[in-house]
Image (cartoon, rainbow, N blue to C red):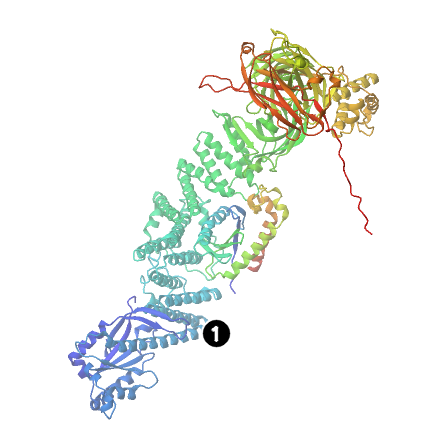
Amino acid sequence: MPQPPRLNAVALISPQNHPILIRTFQKGDELKYHYVAHTSLDVIEERTSGKTKPTECYLGLLYVMDDVAAYGYITPLKVKIVIALALTDSVVRDADVVMIFKALHMAFYEAVSNPFLKLDGVSESTADYSPYQAVGSVKWKRLRQAVDEIHRALCAYAP
Amino acid sequence: MANQRVVVTYAAAQSFQSSDNWIHFLAALRSLLPLRNLHWKPTSRPNLRTVQELDVSLVPLDSLRDEHTSQVPVTLLEKPLLNLYVLSCEDAETYKTTVKKQIKDWQTSVNQRKNQEWLIIHVVRPDSKNVDRKFFSMKGSVLDKIKGDFNIDKRDRCVQLPWSTGEQSPAVWADLIGKIKDGLLAAFDTAVLAREEEVKRSEGQRHMPGWNFCTYFVLKVGCLCCILANLASSFEGVNLFEDALQQYNELEATFMNVLGEKNMSWFGNLINPAPKDDSLPLLSPSKKSYRELILANTISIFDLRVYLLARQSMLLNKMQQPIEICRKAILFLSTFGKRLREVEMALPEYFVESWIFSSALSVVDQCGAWASSWLELEGIALARYNAIKGELLELAKSQLDILGVKVGHLPPKPPFLMALQTVSTTPSSPLPERNPSQRISKYEIMLAIGDIEAFYDLYCTISNRAIDAYVKAGRRKFALKLHGCLAALDNHRGRLSNALAIFSSLPAHYAPHMWTSLESFMLSRAIDTHAVLQKPRDQEWIHLLLGFLKTYVNEPTSESLTSHDINEYVTKLVTALREASEKLDSDLPHLDHPIMALEITKDTRCSQDEDLVYLTVLIHNRLPCDVHVDKIGVVLVGEDTTRLKFTAEFTKLVSGRNYLVLTCPTSSHGTYVHESVEIRIARLHFQWNRKSGGGAGDALTSRKHAIPVHLPRNPESLDVQLCLPPNTALGTTPKLHLTISSGRNDLATASVRLSAPAGITFAFVNSELHSEGEIDTSEDGISIFNVPSNSNVIISVPHSDATRFRAIKIDVSITYKTVRDPALERTLRTSRIVTVALPIAVNVEDFFRGERQVIPGLDSSVKLRTMFVTRLFSRFTISTTTQQHVRISSARLLSAPDAEQGAKILGCHPSHSVMTAVPDRPVSYIFCIESDRGPVSDPLKLVISYRLLREEVEALVNKAVEDALRQLSQESDVGTKLVQAIIEYLECDASWVELYNTTGELIIPSSLDVGEELEEAFSSVQKILSQPNPPSPSLGPWREMTIPVDVPKMNIVADAWIAIQPPPQAEELPRSQLPSIYAGQALSATVYITASLHWNDPENKRQRYRMRYDVEERTKDWLICGRKRGDFLVQDKSTFSVCLTLIALHHGHIELPKVEVKPLPLDGEEDVPRVLPSSDTHQSHGAETVLVLPRGGRSTFIVSMGTKRV
């Protein structure tokens, strides 16, 4: 039984490429994972803007840099999720990664369903349906907790 | 191995081989190679594979070694796949005796070999084929015999070739080539199947548990690898690259499976470091003799995987997939590099870094070299290729990061630490000691380790190459990251200005997408660098700092990427900010910075002793420290963009919420919304505009929509009123009355500006003062001086024509200074709506009438009726223009006081002293103007004094309230409230109007709520108002309107009259006894037309005019005989007459026909347009009727009564 991958960081990014939440589970390496999240956007854009549009949300391995493998996921509403897994020499099964993404997607979905999120939203126009413009980190407490929970679950799964 | 070919053997009888024919045959056969378009339908795979081109090497059978001895698995293609036997025997007998045996021998030897096919080629002369021998010969041909002898199964392995030396046609070979292809494919297929069987068997064994796990497994897996590799290379040999790649991928997967399941230590050594291992080109499969190593089972995992990658890359190269090559290489270098790091201690120093570095670079170079043979990459593919190249280069760069930190060339802090890997797992087996004699061999790395400058150069070069590749690929964000690293390097190297430049340019790239974390990091680095540089803290520095503070307050809770204690750091920066901004040469405005948020509360109040308004605001200081600000200004904007600025000075804003009271010296009031905020710190001005919107909008207020602020009105403050002056004169410059009530202020100076909508201008210069005080007028305003408190200054201001407006809105702006506080300039900005349209409209109708005069020399019978017109009656109709009732106390028509020729004006006496014009019932006044000397050239003036009913009622109520309060001896200021309440009631309900108009009683219902303290006053007011109160001109003010009236001029005023002449015998009878007129009776009548030039200009009085009369045709009433129409000449006081005969057509009172008199054009010059003189005709008999009796006589009517016949 292969070990599930170790989750180093999670980044949720809005359709406008604004960071919604960047969560790092490795102390002292925040800059690195912020960079990973930011640079992943380039690769996601490459993947999604090509002639053949991806049919799945899961974008697969985005790139490998240093000891980190960045995987991408894009929700139907173009919210991007990037996770950074610790690189291992063993095969990382896509199914495992997709499972993590699905969990994150659900967490985000639940967080964004909060009707109070939009209370302080800047925009009054109803056309702009994305409440994540004002990416105040404070408002995403729930989401952060959910993300931490997912990380904890992964850790417990891989002793 | 690259030139692997399919081996095909041939054999032939010795005799045939020695002939010339044989050589030619071989040459011809070779010329047909390589084979093209082989279609392989593999039994184990679903798809049909097509091999475009297959190289075949033809070798004699006896040249092959006997390979049975070797145990080594070789690729399928090293053994022949097909054996040919060529014979040229046309004689059946010979065949039977010798050839058959030869073939038999050959077949036996060939059949022993596994997975090989054979084919017998029977070469015949082409001409012989044409003879159908079957028909003549009893026996079958040689070919039939061969077939019969050797074709064992269904497959036909014999072919006839009708060929001889010199035969050129390729058609003859088709059959043979087809057979060769079939044979090759069949053999290959069986071979592949066999191999796959073998692989399956090996894989099955992999799972077998057992004591011999270790060695057995290694062996088996090794074998498996070899087999798979062989299979793959076999595919490669037949140009089936995809299948080959598939094999390698399977091999890799198997390998990974093994790795995943078992510990690596089963597999022999992870790596046997050899010299130059780290610097050899990664993708070269021939840099070591891998096959031998594999066969000898001594290959290390390292070598095996490198070999695997190299072979895959070779295939991918042939398939022209550079991106895939690089992708695999990166993945391999990263993952395997990580594994190598676990055993780092056993490797030469810096081996891993050196290996990854040089391998990454070599992959890039190798791809570059291969690229020359590829099709040109284009568009997306090129971008992807560049991107992946960039990744490889960045991988190399990050090795330098690790190396640099290890060696000490780079400081152990981010971003250099990013690449440093945390190796957490301890190796499971004890590591062999590092062999000190082993060294890394990559020259650049060795140089870089030794020489710090070389290291930096290398670092920059690689980084720049990566950036270059990323830029070409369009990966901006990757490039930015590398720029950041370069800046950090510059910073470390002491190239501070370089670093500063990069650091300060980078945040701009992160800001648009709100990557505040990275932006903040860059900014803080820039600030730090700036500090180290000790550069002057100029505007640029302030911008950097403000940018940093912005990111700080926007994301205060996120993990900071900087190493400082953030709060302390920010506090220090804010202090420095103040110091720096004090040193600025000029004011530095900064828009929409989020460090402060301002909220306007609704708490506003007026000062009790001066014109001052207080506004409480809540300022949220988002910084962790206190901020000293010099000035806070809030601009409120009211309707009509009147702006008020509330300020407070020198305050300390503590971190968090601050309630501040701002003041504004103004007497304006009303509803305002805030527009902008300014906070000044020394010369740094933070500004927030509500309208500028955007993402920064939330910085100013937490909510986007404007909060209205109501500024209360203080009755004692300065006030201004605008109204129409009580006296309006039409035809002169219109004026407005401006009333400034000073209230409690002793005004030292005040300057007033008025502005009205487009098209209306004020002539301030011509303003007049109507009360005490001093004014000074200029082009754009009026200045007033020294006005004591509680007094009014009334100024009339002329303005341009505004008749096209009903009402105009005038913005008033007054700035004033009081005696008490002469330094403070106060403002009043408000707007007033003035109704400029008059409430009444006046229409005039003129009637020329004359006085009867006897003109001598005329027929005496008409002397009574001759008139000469000298009088003019003017009727003025005064109607309301609005729905308002208008009271009119008087209307007088006055001649100009200095008129040279006095005209006598007689008025009429109205029935009531005060008339009321209501919308559907205008009031008329008639005046008679009598002029002795012709027309009146000077205009007269109509003076109307009027007022609106509303004004009257207001005055009435005011008076009643005053009286009531006086009686009750109460304060007069409560009256305003009472008056307001009553007026409001009257405004809402119109039912009182009718009663008031008739009786003057105003009934106010007691249910009106005026408040407790006013109950008493109200009831007494109620009583006063309910008294009958007939409208009288004495009560209250009246407005006066003066209208200039021109007395009309008329060239000719004519008077037409038809006189019916009585029959001659009745001439002497009095009028009452005139004989009756009967219908059908002819009457003689005379038309008299008297003309007067009295109202003509005096100089034209002598003129003669031509006129035309026309008696109206009334065919139902009158039959007219005589000159109905004719021209005549008139002069002043001349009478023209013409006789007619009239016959009344029926009886009754019949009006006489009208006589129309028209002037004819004057005879002027030829080219002068003819002017029609003006004229007015009065029908003197207009109101008269003639009684016509029915004709006399009797009429008998016989009515048949009917007869009864019996």
Q: Which residue is mark 1?
A: B208
The three-letter amino acid code for the residue at tag 1 is: Met
As drawn, is B67 to the left or to the right of B614? left
Q: Chain of mark 1?
A: B
Measured from the top left, where is residue B48 in percent x and y? 38, 71
Most distant residue in the left direction: B20
Question: In the rendered view, would you say B254 is above or below A53?
Answer: below
Q: Nearer the viewer, residue B123 or A59?
A: B123
As drawn, is A116 to the left or to the right of B350? right
Number of labels in the image equals: 1
What secondary structure is marked by label 1? loop
Question: In the rendered view, would you say B509 is above or below B1111?
Answer: below
Question: In the rendered view, would you say B924 is above or below A17?
Answer: above
Number of residues whose C-alpha sits closer than 10 Å to that of mark 1, classed few (under 14), some (14–19) or many (20 or more): few
Question: In the rendered view, would you say B635 is above or below B848?
Answer: below
Measured from the top left, where is residue B313 in percent x and y? 36, 61
Residue displayed at 50% across by 62% down: A93
- Residue B216 falls in image quadrant: bottom left
Q: Nearer the viewer, residue B698 or B981?
A: B981
Q: The N terminus of chain B lies in which quarter of the figure? A: bottom left
- Residue B622 falls in image quadrant: top right
Q: Is residue B477 visible?
A: yes
Measured from the top left, where is residue B171 in percent x and y? 24, 75
Measured from the top left, where is residue B1133 in percent x and y? 60, 12
Q: Is residue B295 visible?
A: no
Q: Nearer the viewer, residue B583 or B5?
A: B5
Most distant residue in the bottom direction: B138
Residue displayed at 24% across by 72% down: B32
